[in-house]
Each structure stands twice: as C-alpha cells, then as structure tokens.
Amino acid sequence: MKTFKYILTIGFILSCANQMQAQFTKNLEISSYYDDNLFRSPTPTQDLLTNIEMSLNYRPDDSNMNLHYRGSFLLYRDTYDRNFSLHEFGLNYNYSFGNEDRHTLYLGSDGTMRLNGEDYNYYDYTQIYLYSNIRFDLDFLFVKAGYNFRYRNYSNLPDLNNFRHFVFLQANKSFASRTTIIFEADFGYKSFAGENTYTTSLGSGRGRGNMVEESQIITMTEIPSLQQAIVLTRLAQSLHENLGIFIQYRRQISLTDQIKYINTDSYYQDEELFDDPFSFESSSVSSGLTWILPWSMKVQIGGSLFSKNYISEQAYTTADDTVGLGGTRVDDQKSIYFNFYKSFYINKSWLNLLKVNFYYGYIENDSNSYWYKYKNAILGGGIQWTF
C-alpha cells in the first residue's frame, strides 16, 4: 500500500510538471531487486527492495544552465522500518571558449537531503556539493582539471559532520587504432567536526613552612583529518563499431598515519558510514565490456579485484573477540556484474522513451575480520519512463 501511495504521489508531480513549459524533461523509474545479504554481514538477511526515482530537469531556451531535482524512495519489503528517501536539488552550467569554442568550463552545485524513519533517523543528513572543472582540447590531448567541495551534516551524529576537498588532473589521449588512454591523479582532504581532546597536568612546588602543590592543567584539542592521494590509469579499446572494452588500475594511498575514525559494523545503504574511503589504502583492477546490440539493446559485463588495507581499524577474529586479535584489518574483494538494457522510442507528446533493464551483481569479500567476511548477490530489474 505504501509503495502504491508513493507511485501515485510521484505520478501527480510529473503530471503537473507536464503542464509547464516544454523545456522540462521528466523521468520516472521503478526498480525492484532481491538482495540475499542486505547488511553485508557474515549472517545474511534477505529482503526485496523497491526503488522509486523521479527526476525533473529544466533548461531555459538558449541557455547553458540546467536546473534539476531528483527524488529517490527506497522501500524494504520486510525491514520496512529502514525505508528512507533521498532528495537532490542542483544547478550546473557550462561555458565554451577559446578557438572554435574548443575548451569548456563546468560549474555546478547540489544540495542533498536524506530522510529516514524515526527508528533510524541518526542516518539522516544534509549535504552541499560544489564543483568547478575545466577541459582543454589541445589537438593531440585532452586535459581536464578541477576542484570539488562537499560539506555533510549528520543531524544526529554531529561528531561525523565533515568537510571534504578534492583536486584532480586528468589527461586523455586517443589514437587512430581506436585506443584511448586516461591518466588521472587526485588529492583528497577530509576533516570531521568532532574533536580529540588531550589533557596534561604540569608543575608542582613546595612553599615555606607548609607543603603547597601547584599544578597547571593544559587542554589541547585536535580536529581529526584525513588525507589521501589517488592515481588511476584506464586503457579503453574499441573492438568493433558497437563493441568496446576497458581495463583500469587504481591505487589509493593514505597520507595520514593514524586515524580516530572507525567504520560502523553494519551496512545501512550508506556506503560512507559502512566503509569510508578515507579509512583505508587500496589497489584495484577492474574491467568491463559494453556491447551495443540491434533493436536499441545494450549489454554490459564487468568485474573487479579490490584489495584494502585499513589504517587503524582492528580485525576481530571471531564474534566473541573484543580485543582485535587479528591485527590491522585487511580485505580482499571480488565482484562481477551483468546489465541488460532495452529502449523503446515512443516519440509521443505524452511519452518520449521507455527503457527496461535487468541486472545481476555479486560480491565476495574476504577479510581477516570476522565481521567483514561476506558474500552478497543482487538480482533485479526496472523500468524507466521519459516524458
């Protein structure tokens, strides 16, 4: 019944938007999937989830500016007390300049809000994201550089409120053999609102006649912060007019020796709380194949090998281990995925495009920590309408 009410509400909003100016693009997508390990735990919990997502995009005539809204409602069949919604409002702009407008400047901002039910409202957050990128076409090479900033506020977990900064530089080179090489270097910095406090007592003395003790208490505070560097190389090759493959290597290096941040031991559809990327070093190899088929169909197949070395998090060898006998946590993860898409171009006044998709994903995570040894398979499909 709740799912039906959500669909009716979203349909009403899209219908109202359809009466507005023609510069609006409207999308509605409904997908359902079966998850055999909902919380990515050594003791699996299964559930069926439904995601209802709508998006509105508005671009004024003769303008390079775009306004958008995206609302997503994630509904659980059994653990329905974990239902939540995400709402994103954004603005982006691009400006071409230089000889024949070959270079492009990109600017944008987004505001995001997550809303959970009362029992899990400590995962609620609001977020501001800003970015600025510039892309140069240098004939023999494409170069892109940029900076992005994010502030996230957890209303019920204030110590985890954080600022995040990223700068990056990317070079993209294509060859006549239909080969493309991409190299990227990133630097990231993240600081938390919570403070580490250190108290030190100094000084003592003897007075004339009677013992007099004097002491000075010094309190120092430190804002926890994390830094990392990332290097990425991707090789993409077109095998045929409608068939392409890529292979990518990514290395993430921590520039912080010790951290106070500890990941939560339960996965709640919020990857950052479950596994903050700043809390570990990693190396990964991934590959994927995209095949454009006749009749507006597309297939994507891929997988990755991912190794993670955590900076300060301890590994607990059993469910009863409270000390962390396994030393520092180390994970090795394998994953594969399969996606199939089919588009139907309607080109009617009331409907432009209908797209259906089916997907399968599998993750196997091995760890020296008992709590992070798990397998997770997801099978589902969805349908999307573009108005």
Image: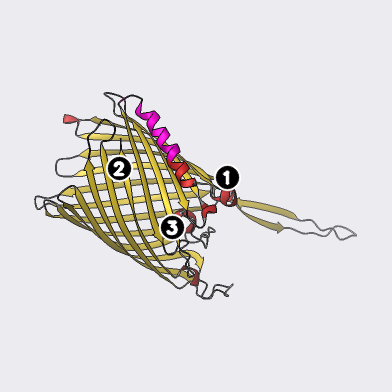
Q: What's the CA distance linking mark 2 and mark 3? A: 41 Å
Q: Position of 194 compared to 387: left or right?
A: right
Of marks 2 and 3, the one in the foreground: 3
The structure residue drawn at horizontal position 43% and vertical position 61%, both measured from the top left corner, is 280
**Cβ–Cβ under 8 Å for marks 3 and 1:** no
Q: Which mark is residue 145?
A: 2
Q: What's the CA distance linking mark 3 and mark 1? A: 29 Å
Quick check: is 241 in the magenta stretch? no
The structure residue drawn at horizontal position 21% and vertical position 52%, both measured from the top left corner, is 298
Q: Which residue is identified by label 3?
A: 48
Q: Is residue 122 above or below residue 386?
A: below
**Cβ–Cβ under 8 Å for marks 1 and 2:** no
The structure residue drawn at horizontal position 54% and vertical position 59%, both measured from the top left corner, is 260
Viewer-nearest residue: 142 or 203: 142
- The amino acid sitting under disc 3 is Leu
Viewer-nearest residue: 157 or 353: 353
Q: Which residue is identified by label 1?
A: 155
Mark 1: secondary structure = loop
Q: Which residues are magenta?
A: 8-22
Q: Give the image location of residue 120, x and y in percent.
A: 57, 52
Mark 2: secondary structure = strand
